[in-house]
Image: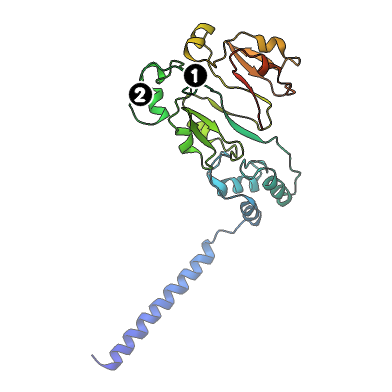
Amino acid sequence: MGIMTIILSAVSVGAVGLLIGLLLCLAGKKFAVEENETEAAVRAALPGNNCGGCGYAGCDGLAQAIAQGSAPVNACPVGGTAAAAQIAQIMGVEAQEDEPKTAFVACGGDCTVAKVKYEYYGKADCGAASVAPGGGDKLCGYGCLGLGSCVAACPFDAIHVIKGVAVVDEDKCKACGKCVAACPKHLIFMIPKNAPARVRCSSHDMAKMVMAACETGCRGCTLCTRVCPNGAVKMDNSLAVIDYSLCTGCGTCAEKCPARSIQRRTT
């Protein structure tokens, strides 16, 4: 092979590479998607956890929705008021302050007070246990199964199973809602973080059945509704519920509850 052949081959390869690079450059400019500066600024203000607690597919999806005006500036539960204020400034609107929320497990039936009807040896998953005979091993069909599906779902290590019942660490909870969606018993829901009293029971059974199943189950005695000076406690199908818009935190309901189903916030 002559030297001229080698030189021509090298020049040909270089020319082809140069042509391909030029074509790619032109194609990139022609088909480039213009970056929305507002969307990029909103995205930078979000925490980047991509937890999905806002209802969108991660922080990118939420940033796009906020920039388009289809999501509120305070839609990120993780970023809280700080992120909401920053995004509101970017969007040129006034930030609305929402009351901080936390996840709450409406069950106090741990292994020291709740009765079981059999030993469960199946998959360590609340969804699987909930479709077992009787809806799980607890005598109370409404009780926490304690197998930690909510723990696995939480991206912030804010919920743990203690003595067979899920318990939320409110200092870590970002109110993303992952645990709410993971609980097959629908025992976890969001409440105001400063809620002064909480009903740690979800049973709608009659008093006799509740007392046989769990020492701290709500018996539907209505005593809490009668002693509350603000009418903040009502009964919903034999279960006490608290209207936080009326509750002043006097603690009377918790003090008078014979089953200790209602507990005052300790911190």
**Label ID, residue 120:** 2
Marks counted in the figure total 2
Given this view, does label 2 or label 1 mark the residue nearer the observer? Answer: 1
Q: Please name the residue shown 45% across and 73% down the image.
A: 21
Q: Nearer the viewer, residue 145 or 23?
A: 145
Q: Quadrant of the C terminus?
A: top right
Position in image of residue 143 (x %, y %): 48, 21
Q: Is residue 123 left or right of residue 65?
A: left
Position in image of residue 125 (x %, y %): 40, 31
Labels 2 & 1 near each other (Cβ < 8 A)? no
Q: Is residue 10 left or right of residue 53?
A: left
When asked about the image quadrant of residue 99, the answer is: top right
**Label ID, residue 113:** 1
Q: Is residue 59 above or below residue 141?
A: below
Q: Is residue 58 above or below residue 186?
A: below
Label 1: which secondary element: loop
Q: Please name the residue shown 50% across and 15% down the image.
A: 214
Q: Is residue 171 left or right of residue 10?
A: right
When asked about the image quadrant of residue 224, the answer is: top right
Position in image of residue 153 (x %, y %): 48, 38
Q: CA distance from mark 2 to mark 1?
A: 18 Å
Q: Please name the residue shown 33% across and 87% down the image.
A: 8
Q: Amino acid at mark 1?
A: Val
Q: How is the image coloured?
A: rainbow
Q: Is residue 175 left or right of residue 120?
A: right
Q: Amino acid at mark 2?
A: Tyr
**Label ID, residue 173:** none
